Amino acid sequence: MNKLDIPLVSVVILNCNRLPDLKETIERTKDIAYNKLEIIVVDNGSNDGSVEYIQLLDDRIFKKIILNHNSGSAHGHNVGMKLAKGKYVITIDDDCFLSPKSIDIFVDYFEKYPKLAGIGCGFVNPYKGFDNDLYWSKPKISCSDHEINNSYETFVYTSASAWRKSALEEINYIDENWFYVTEDVELCFGLIANGYNTIVFDELIAFHKTSPLNRDFAVIDFNGIAGNIMLIIKYLPIFLIPIKLFAIINKVIFYSVVNMKWLYLKAFFNGLIKSVVLLKNNKRLTYRLAKKTSLTPVNLLFQR
């Protein structure tokens, strides 16, 4: 591709109280070898000095959005993605960074496959190596045209991934009923239900430190379970909803008793209550697509 013809790509970095990690992510992002790059930094209500650091960043390189409270991952990402001017949008969490050539590969795939709307990476923890814990389905090293055009991978994590901006606009971005955890799965379900493909390639490496800063596993578990309930009710065919809910409530009751964590039951019913408004959704997955897509495995949430 001629350098003059390459599309503008926007990178959206979302931060919340992880200043040490953010500093590395910023420096690594500045080193990305791509000629038409817009960098947007969104701070989600930090109080650890992140805001002061972001405000000092060079205005010629960075666009800055400071939110006065933590409005959730879905809203934080949406704010940045809506501001983005690029044909393609890269989302990066504050404890992640991309390999220098990743954006060229993202762009090549998007330009070749017009129905491809989301591309995820293979994750490497810089301190541990390849991070299998971040995969709940098998990533792909290389694919045929047929495989790419028929891929419905739901674990394209917003922590380090690429998105087609026009497809995001078409589905009105991430549903902000999702506050934190599974909002990226919700985004994938929305794209797939609207006729797009999403895929994960582990040839595209992202470095994910899984920072312990500002990481509350009780909050993750609660929102993960509630988010799964919401995904089932919003996107699955109506006849599958009671079957899937019955399977989850059995696990919720079992692990609540075994682990003496009533948080799981609270999360289940919170998801049900929040899902009332989602029943009206008329862009559901077909049964064929529902069989090809995956929810977050709740067993992993219960076994911390």
Image: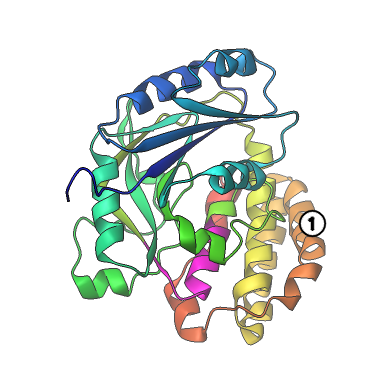
Any part of residue 202 in sight? no
In the image, what residue type sits under mark 1? Asn
From this view, report whether residue 125 is shown above or below residue 244: above
**Does 114 sit left or right of 284 as displayed?**
left
Q: Is residue 92 magenta?
A: no
Q: Nearer the viewer, residue 151 or 112?
A: 112
Query: Which residue is pictured at 65% across the width and 15% down the height?
Result: 48
Q: Nearer the viewer, residue 30 or 279?
A: 30
Query: Which residue is pictured at 42% across the width and 75% down the height?
Result: 292
Q: Position of residue 142 (x, y in %)?
A: 18, 59
Residue 251 position by quadrant:
bottom right
Q: Nearer the viewer, residue 120 or 90?
A: 90
The residue singled out by tag 1 in the image is 270
From this view, report whether residue 199 is shown above or below residue 151: above
The magenta span reads: 185-198
**Does 91 sit left or right of 248 as displayed?**
left
**Does 265 sit left or right of 140 as displayed?**
right
Any part of residue 301 in sight? yes
In the structure shown, which secondary structural element does the residue marked by tag 1 occupy? helix
Q: Position of residue 226 (x, y in %)?
A: 70, 56
Image quarter of the C terminus: top right
Q: Position of residue 229 (x, y in %)?
A: 68, 64
Query: Which residue is pictured at 61% across the width and 61% down the height?
Result: 172
Q: Magenta stretch: dominant SS?
A: helix
Q: Is residue 192 magenta?
A: yes
